[in-house]
Image (spheres, helix red, strand yellow):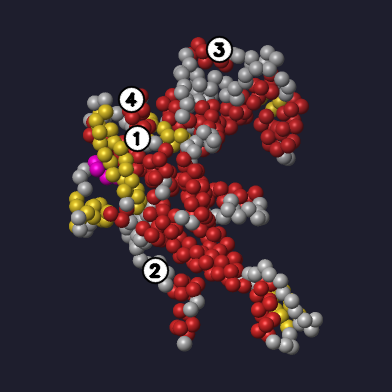
Amino acid sequence: MKKDFLSHNTLIAQLLNTPYQKPLSHKDIAMIMGDLIVSQSTLSRKAHIEKKEVIISTKNTKYQEILRSVFHASIISQILETFLYGINVFEINWERRDGLLVPSLVGRDFQEFKFNNEGKLVFLGNGGEEEIPPFKVVYGIYNQSFRVPYGESTLRHLYFSVNIKNAGLEFWIRFLEKFGEPWAIAKTDDDPQSLAYEVSNMLNGSTAVIDKEEEIELIQPSAKSDFKDLIQYCDSQITRFILGGNLTGEVKEGSLAAAQAHNEIRSEIALSDERILCYVCNRVIGFFKELNGIKEEITFSLFNEDEPKLELANRDKTIYEMGFQPTQEYIEKTYNIKTTALSIKEQELSAETPTKKGEKDFKPFKNALNTPLIPFKLPLNKNLSLDEIDSFTENLKLKDLDLQSLLENAKSFEEVMDSLEKSLQGEDLEIAEALLSEAIMNAQIYGAING
């Protein structure tokens, strides 16, 4: 009896017959990808990477132009869909151009490939396994493990939600079709069939003539259904799984902290997609170098102009002020900018350039790039003596101000700062800042070297 009852319930039958563990057919994939929420969330996830600029790091402009044409927007978009299938396979076709073998990527159906017993990818063609020639195929895998050797397929995870959502939507439409219109209820003590005929004509646009004792009333159904909530729940789960959250999909309420947490999660998810993209593209570049006998270093990377590397820039600035100058190659590769090295004379002129009303640009470290910061005549690779640092601090006297005495007798940091500001003005304050910076740096270096 229970089995017969369930067979007549469309939604429950759909729930019980969901073949989640079975391989997805092309029809299933088309059904999932055709869902508006899935499509929208997928585009949003890929856009986080697609907005970045492709960087081909090589000194040879010819190689740059060729590889930029290989990794065009369409191919990058296809590679970024690896998370949908688990494994994403691309066939490489080679053509000779300007004396070089140039690759061309073509996306293939991942279900046409499998790993053999040796762990090598083979092609399933003509009813059997065919070995793939070298340099012919490249693939990316999303979250591969011993449990999922073909990667974690997002489509398989979404199948249940999308299928139930469609079943709920169909049930909701049928429910509205049957019960969404007002009901016409007539009351009579005479012939009910005649009155029913009159009511039917009235609902079809005709008129109805009834006796005074008869009554017709239109009643709007008031029963509520949870199928609308079910659809919204499925949409929310789809958005959460693809984007790591649904704050952008359902902007009802939230806070700045929630938005920041959501963006951090999205950035981490996008980083995993970016790593797959860089792996696939650098793999193709490796084939390109090997087939053409190129020994020069060539790498594929992405740069986002909308997200400047402020933290990295501040770190490099601190290292520069410590007396260590990064190389021109590092700056160009890290920040994706073209630089020109300044001569020593140009550096000196730049240091003397006035800033405000004739004031010179003050550097916190005196001659930071010309002489060591340590006032002791010892290189960094030798141990510094703590007594030497104490001696430097004790003998550090500025005009009539005894710094050591001030530090020992002051009750708070604010008291020290007030005393310095009252005792030192103008050039004396600049000199004090430079000397104190050297003292602090010496103490930090001593601590780093001696643990």
Q: Which residue is mark 1?
A: 70
- Residue type, label 1: Val
The residue at which mark 3 appears reads as 349
In this rendering, position of residue 45 left or right of residue 86: right
Tell me if residue 227 is in the magenta stretch: no
* Residue at x 50% of width, y 64% of height: 166
Q: Nearer the viewer, mark 1 or mark 3?
A: 1
Numbered disc 2: secondary structure: loop
Name the residue tied to disc 2.
19
Task: Find numbered disc 3 in the image and state the secondary structure of the residue it sits on.
Answer: helix
What is the distance, in whole Å, between disc 1 and disc 3 at their CAs?
45 Å
Which circle, 4 or 3, is nearer the viewer? 4
Which kind of residue does numbered mark 3 sit on? Leu
Q: Name the residue beneath numbered marker 4.
A: 62
Disc on the earlier residue, 1 or 3: 1
Amino acid tagged 2: Pro
* Horizontal and vertical percent position of residue 204: 65, 69
Q: Nearer the viewer, residue 326 or 154?
A: 154
What residue lies at 37% left-to-right and 67% top-to-bottom? 21
* Residue ID at (56%, 66%): 173
User: Where in the figure is residue 296, as x and y percent of width and height?
Assistant: 29, 28
Please identify, in this view, whether the residue under mark 2 or under mark 4 is nearer the observer: 2
> In this rendering, would 413 be left or right of 80?
right
Dot 1 falls on a residue whose secondary structure is helix
Q: Are marks 4 and 3 in contact (CB under 8 Å)?
A: no
Is there CB contact under 8 Å for labels 1 and 3?
no
